[in-house]
Amino acid sequence: MFELFKKESKYKDGITKIKTPATYCLIVAAVMLIGSVVQSILVLPLVIGDLDSVEAIDTVLASQTMTLYNLYLTIVISLMILYVGIKMHGRSFESMGLSAHHALKHYLIGLGVGFLTLSGAMLITYVFGGARFAGIDLSNIGLLLLYFVGFLFQGFEEELLCRGFMMFGLSKNHSVFFSMMFNSLLFAALHIGNPGVSPLALANLFLAGLSFSCMAVYFDNIWAASGAHSMWNFAQGNFYGILVSGMSMGPSVFKFELVGNALISGGSFGLEGGIGVFLVEIITILIFCLLYKYKKEKVM
């Protein structure tokens, strides 16, 4: 069943410089640190008019405008990692998971997978009493569209960083299995500082990283994983109105409140801290393994 994990990397020839796992971690840390500094500088115009009031600055930093601004500014880190990978390390676009072959088709498939899997987790949580319906709000369609586009940037950034740059890069001289596991651990570790994080939340984030890795390996690019990642976050925060990795994401179409046992609801981390996401991620990984098995048998 797990032939997907044994698959050989398709893009080894597109990687000219071999990096160790530790080196990849240092590069990712450096890019994120420098990117955060650049993002902070770009945020200054939003608060420059309120420098006389700490309370006013805090209000701006916690505002919906800032949330949207930060989503769009993830493009800074995407551009940086592209520069590091392609210009500094001699990587091809394909070896970064950016193959143009069926890119739009795979991206649209990813959007559908992201919505279905998140909705499945939401349904499990609701059925077992971890969520309560609290209403519908269709008054912010324009703002919701801005969030949707922002999450397209944000999902792409994390997939480019963890799957495109790191996972495909590591597979130059490591097994696909190791590359998938290592980047998924890093993906979970990147969320350790989020509000309300728990051991189950970290386990779910590792499994989410692994499911996105399965998509990237199955399709030989990051487009499906990027679409799934973006839609997962958007659907969670702006369709169902649930916290995204412990953070509120503004208006939503539906309003759901997480209630009861944190093991079911996810507690203050949101849906991703509960058992519903755990089950859905396991099922997603198994499905992609079975799809790859079928695909391989069909070719043979």
Image (cartoon, helix red, strand yellow):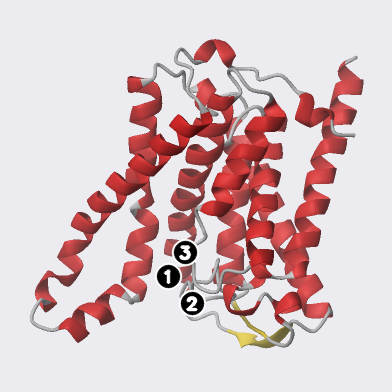
Indicate the position of residue 239 as horizontal and vertical percent values: 60, 70
**Location of residue 117 (image quadrant):** bottom right
Indicate the position of residue 81 as horizontal and vertical percent values: 38, 35
For image coordinates 49% across by 46% down, the residue present is 158
User: Mark 2–mark 1 contact, CB under 8 Å?
Assistant: yes
Secondary structure category for the residue under label 3? loop
Indicate the position of residue 174 as horizontal and vertical percent values: 63, 22
Secondary structure category for the residue under label 2? loop
- How many marks on residues? 3
Left/right placement of residue 156 relative to residue 188 reads left
Name the mark on residue 55.
none
Q: Distance between the Cα atoms at labels 3 and 2? A: 24 Å
Residue 216, can we see it?
no
Name the mark on residue 251.
2
* Amino acid type of the residue that numbered disc 3 sits on in the rendered structure: Gly
For image coordinates 36% across by 46% down, the residue present is 32
Name the mark on residue 193.
3
Q: Which of the pair 189/294 is nearer the observer?
A: 189
Quadrant where the N terminus sits is top right
Q: Which of the pair 299/44 is nearer the observer?
A: 44
* Amino acid type of the residue that numbered disc 2 sits on in the rendered structure: Pro
Residue 180, can we see it?
yes
For image coordinates 81% across by 71% down, the residue present is 124
**Location of residue 183 (image quadrant):** top right
Name the mark on residue 143.
1
